Image (tube, coloured by chain):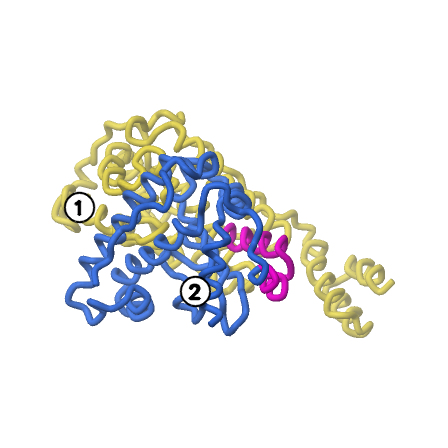
């Protein structure tokens, strides 16, 4: 009965609902229910829908460096699982995940505790993987003169960048990522993160990154992560890296 | 005392079809061996050199990450091989079963919660049954951590690093955990650790 009244009142204003709920002395559970209903009805806003970005190349495009089966599972199962979890969460907590991904990740602390870890893991995973598919491609691209000069300036050359990056990635104990971040003035830096954490969580921007969860390489390289790391540079799409570098400096790079 | 890699207590193909020969070859002969070798290198010259494995694990936790990771994983894997056996997962010895029912609800509930702990361990890690302050608890831990560093004694653990199941189960971690608890667990070994911890 009380619940019916609450629902009807909710069609009025949020203020009226708050008053009705407290004056009726509703139980905590019904109160929580009313609060959940309120923003959805007041704003008539549908939950955010997350979708799996299509792989910008065929599953076998990165062979022999990354095999087709790994790509199929990694994109179609692992990334899809993050998407599914996010859609479940978006339906359960309407309004909380309807901001740009980079804005949510930068401010995870402002999310209610019940959603925070879920967003950290799944939205982090969604952002990291969306970046990862984009910055890989058919072997054969080369760094252009602008990015080469920056790499020379910040790392002392491509080989030094590769060695430092691979060392950081090899050192991740358990699951995680290695990234090259780019500041708004174009400075590059290497950092590693556990699980699906991302430099986006500190408001930074990622130029490119490599996934060192075992699912990224186990079918092809098993325990030999260093071999995967070495081979992976063959599928880094330098054209995309250059594009992202320009976007970072222009302030338009998002994830 | 340096760390050494013991042989598997069964043939590499003994746990098929639930865990393949290939998985055990990589997992025992490569991954576990790397933890042993790295652990031996990293313990040299530290205050833990010559200490028992359990003391190294507990002592280095929070103080020496490299050593802790490798010693912790050596400890976890040393037991993991014994926590499994061919045709495992059968009846649970009576006293342990009674304790499971008292502390964890029922055998079915224990299995369900153990599987859930493994599924919800995000990233690499382990699912556990441990004895803490005289009571059994279901726990989970990240990477090389274990109940040893949570003030408890593990009596059963399942490795949920992807290298433990990716060849056989791919992304289907829940299927691996179910197979482990239903067909692989060596409850006699769990019982031995329980008896020892309960003293």
Residue in the image at 23% along x and 38% along y: A227
Whether residue B114 is in magenta: the answer is yes
SS for callout 1: helix
User: Residue A191, position in %: x, y?
Assistant: 28, 54
Name chain A's colour. Answer: yellow
Residue in the image at 29% along x and 50% along y: B6
Which residue is the site of mark 2? B147
Residue in the image at 42% along x and 50% along y: B159
Which residue is the site of mark 1? A163
Front-lying residue, A211 or A135: A211
Query: Among the chains, which one is blue?
Result: B
Front-lying residue, B88 or B149: B88
Q: Which mark is residue B164?
A: none
Range drawn in magenta: B97-120
Chain label for disc 2: B
Chain label for disc 1: A
């Amino acid at each position: 009965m009380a619940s019916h009244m609450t629902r009807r009142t909710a069609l009025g204003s949020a203020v009226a609902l708050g008053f009705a709920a407290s004056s009726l002395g509703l139980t905590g559970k019904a109160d929580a229910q009313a609060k959940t209903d309120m923003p959805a009805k007041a704003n008539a806003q549908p939950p955010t829908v997350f979708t799996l970005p299509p792989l910008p190349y065929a599953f076998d495009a990165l062979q022999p460096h990354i095999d087709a089966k790994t790509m199929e599972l990694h994109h179609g199962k692992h990334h899809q699982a993050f998407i599914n979890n996010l859609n479940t969460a978006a339906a359960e907590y309407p309004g909380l995940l309807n901001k740009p991904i980079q804005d949510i990740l930068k401010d995870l602390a402002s999310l209610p505790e019940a959603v925070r870890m879920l967003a950290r893991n799944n939205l982090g995973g969604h952002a990291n993987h969306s970046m990862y598919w984009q910055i890989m491609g058919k072997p054969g691209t080369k760094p252009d003169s602008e990015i080469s000069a920056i790499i020379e300036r910040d790392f002392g050359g491509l080989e030094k960048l590769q060695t430092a990056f691979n060392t950081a990635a090899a050192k991740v104990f358990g699951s995680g990522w290695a990234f090259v971040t780019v500041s708004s003035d174009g400075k590059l830096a290497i950092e590693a993160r556990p699980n699906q954490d991302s430099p986006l969580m500190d408001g930074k921007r990622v130029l490119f990154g490599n996934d060192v969860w075992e699912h990224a390489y186990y079918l092809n390289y098993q325990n030999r992560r260093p071999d995967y790391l070495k081979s992976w540079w063959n599928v880094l799409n330098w054209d995309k890296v250059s594009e992202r570098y320009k976007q970072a400096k222009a302030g338009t790079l998002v994830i | 005392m340096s760390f050494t890699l013991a042989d598997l207590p069964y043939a590499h193909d003994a746990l098929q079809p639930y865990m393949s020969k290939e998985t055990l070859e990589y997992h025992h002969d490569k991954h576990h061996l790397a933890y042993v070798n790295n652990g031996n290198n990293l313990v040299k010259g530290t205050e833990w050199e010559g200490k028992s494995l359990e003391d190294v694990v507990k002592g280095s936790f929070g103080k020496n990450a490299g050593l802790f990771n490798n010693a912790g994983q050596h400890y976890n894997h040393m037991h993991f091989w014994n926590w499994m056996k061919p045709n495992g997962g059968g009846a649970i010895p009576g006293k342990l079963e009674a304790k499971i029912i008292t502390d964890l609800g029922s055998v079915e509930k224990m299995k369900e919660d153990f599987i859930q702990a493994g599924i919800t361990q995000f990233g690499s890690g382990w699912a556990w049954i441990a004895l803490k302050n005289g009571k059994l608890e279901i726990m989970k831990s990240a990477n090389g951590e274990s109940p040893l560093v949570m003030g408890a004694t593990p009596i059963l653990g399942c490795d949920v690093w992807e290298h433990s199941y990716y060849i056989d189960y791919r992304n289907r971690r829940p299927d691996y955990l179910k197979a482990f608890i239903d067909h692989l667990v060596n409850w006699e070994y769990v019982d031995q650790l329980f008896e020892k911890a309960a003293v």
